[in-house]
Image (cartoon, rainbow, N blue to C red):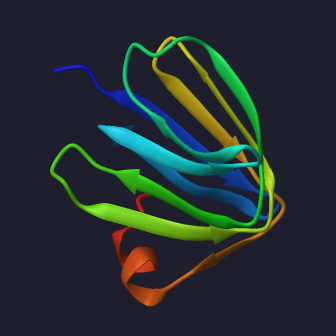
């Protein structure tokens, strides 16, 4: 099974990093799902939730105000200025 290597960073440091099965981001053109072996992608993010679905099915959801996402060779990089995490997502986040 293929997986994604995810690096999610904000101005204050790493928000989440690790392996994931899927990432869903709020792109300016609409919600965008990112899966393994996808074409290289670069998109601007709007306000909304970033969802990281781990290989075991657990979900980490983080609210962002904007930023960017890039995907190339199964590596997803998400960069934002600031994030809002609820407590359950913060407990599930892997740093």
Q: Quadrant of residue 42?
A: top right
Please tell me whether residue 72 is drawn above or below residue 20 in the rendered image: above
The picture places residue 93, in percent across and down from the top left corner, at: 42, 65
Q: Quadrant of residue 3?
A: top left
The picture places residue 11, in percent across and down from the top left corner, at: 83, 59
Q: Nearer the viewer, residue 62 or 28?
A: 28
Left or right: residue 45 versus residue 52 is right
User: What residue lies at 52% left-to-right and 24% top-to-bottom?
Assistant: 75
Left or right: residue 6 versus residue 2 is right
User: What residue lies at 39% left-to-right and 28% top-to-bottom?
Assistant: 35
Please tell me whether residue 87 is drawn above or below residue 48 in the rendered image: below
Q: Please state the total of marks drawn on the protein image.
A: 0
User: What residue lies at 29% left-to-right and 37% top-to-bottom?
Assistant: 21
Please tell me whether residue 34 is drawn above or below residue 51 in the rendered image: above
User: What residue lies at 79% left-to-right and 67% top-to-bottom?
Assistant: 65
Please tell me whether residue 93 is drawn above or below residue 20 in the rendered image: below
Task: Looking at this view, name the residue that lies furthest to the bottom.
Answer: 87
The picture places residue 76, in percent across and down from the top left corner, at: 55, 31
Left or right: residue 56 versus residue 45 is left
Screen quadrant of the N terminus? top left
């Amino acid at each position: 099974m293929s997986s994604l290597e995810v690096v999610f960073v904000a101005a204050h440091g790493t928000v989440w990093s690790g392996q994931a099965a899927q990432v869903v981001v709020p792109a300016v053109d609409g919600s965008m799902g990112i899966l393994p072996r996808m074409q290289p992608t670069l998109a601007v993010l709007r306000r909304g939730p970033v969802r990281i679905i781990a290989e075991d099915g657990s979900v980490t959801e983080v609210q962002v105000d904007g930023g960017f996402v890039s995907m190339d060779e199964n590596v997803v990089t998400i960069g934002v200025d600031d994030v809002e995490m609820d407590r359950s997502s913060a407990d599930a986040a892997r740093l």
